[in-house]
Image (cartoon, helix red, strand yellow):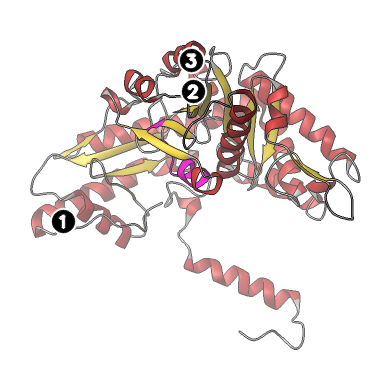
Amino acid sequence: MAFPEHGQPWEALKSDLVGFKTEDLDWRRGRLPAYIYYYDEKVLRVQTEAYRIYAVENGLGEGKAFRSLTRMLDDIASMACDLFRAPPSAGVSFTSGGTESLFEAVKAARKWHRVNRPKATGRLKVVAPLSAHATLNKAGDILDVDIVRVPLAGEWRADVAAMEATIDDDTIMLFASAPCFPYGVFDPIRRLGEVALRRDLWLHVDGCWGGFISPFAARLGYPIPDWDLAVPGVWSLSADLHKFAYAAKGASLLLFRDAALKEYERFEFSGWPRGTYATPTFLGTRPAGAIASAWAVLRYLGMEGYLKTTKAAMDATMGMIAGMDSIEGLRCLRPIGEANLYAFTSEDPDVDIMAVADHLQARGWFPGRLRDPVAIQQGVNPVHLPIVDEYVSEVAAAVAAVRAGGSVGAFREDSY
């Protein structure tokens, strides 16, 4: 497309945009396991209208040109500290998503280590379980920090003893997931916290997926282990607002046990004619709409609302798991109930699970594909609750077709 010589009417452009969406999968009908986090049209309206009111303002001017953003960020930080049981000394940074939150955590840990532990003799490293999110390696690549992934113990969880044995003078951080994205289980964070205290190391907990599900699931009686800032030894925690807090993208939080640690993520530069340029996180310009949306949705839903959204997501998860286990030849990975994530594999040599995924994808679903073990992995939204039976029927039909036809699939990288 060449750059247009003349402008076009908004109504024509709006029609084009609406038309473009017909090419996408229907997330309102539960066809997506991730990317979109949706409860209902009322919450969506609060999310989008709050964003629209602040669509033009720039988060870079927070506290200067736009003091209202400081008010909202302070409120968000206070609510998060309460939810994640932070000590009074805690500090909070608002970021653009889980990627930036993990990047900032590693960056702060690296700088803290350089200032307080100048004994490193080789390349700095983060010690993490094999199941840590891939974004951690993106942070390591940018920051020139090695990510050492340690094989898992039983139940797909971090091997605490093996992780401790990997620590040396170059280790800047221990990393844990709450839950891990591949398997939907929590690492043994309390035990890792004991290691962090014993070795005086930074422990980061990645709650980007579960941060705004887990506290409410625990209140509903699900087996959620201790994982947040109330656990001794946890130095920082990340949680995405634009997932199950239902804020507009991009919005995430990075919490520090001690607000003084925020200085290690801050960037400041004065060696140019304009004067001092400083940002609390990676981004300079950042959308104020994301801040306004997060502030509005947190207050709109409150504890009562999030218990409802979480119950819907977890009811859908457990319903899908029961449905998968009822299909001959399929089995869901255990343990279950710690997150709105699950995976199911085939125990029947005549049913190739990737072929099942291919059938589902051809029918308009978007199955997640797990490589180890080979399985279909699903994230679950509240929007999936009304279609649990439909999805189970679709999977059963796909299994029957694969068993009858002997089709074989392959792991594909176009999974979420």
Q: Quadrant of residue 266?
A: top right
Given residues 323 and 83, the one toward you in this image is 83
The residue sitting at 70% across, 34% down in the picture is 93
Residue under numbered circle 2: 217
Given residues 103 and 390, the one toward you in this image is 103
What range of the chain is rendered magenta?
128-139
Element class at badge 1: helix
1 or 3: mark nearer the eye: 3
- Mark positioned earlier in the residue sequence (1 or 3): 3
Amino acid type for the residue under numbered disc 2: Ala
Residue 297 in the image, given as x and y percentages of width and height: 69, 37
Left or right, 342 with respect to 139, comes to left
Given residues 273 and 413, the one toward you in this image is 273
Residue under numbered circle 1: 401
2 or 3: mark nearer the eye: 3
Amino acid type for the residue under numbered disc 3: Arg
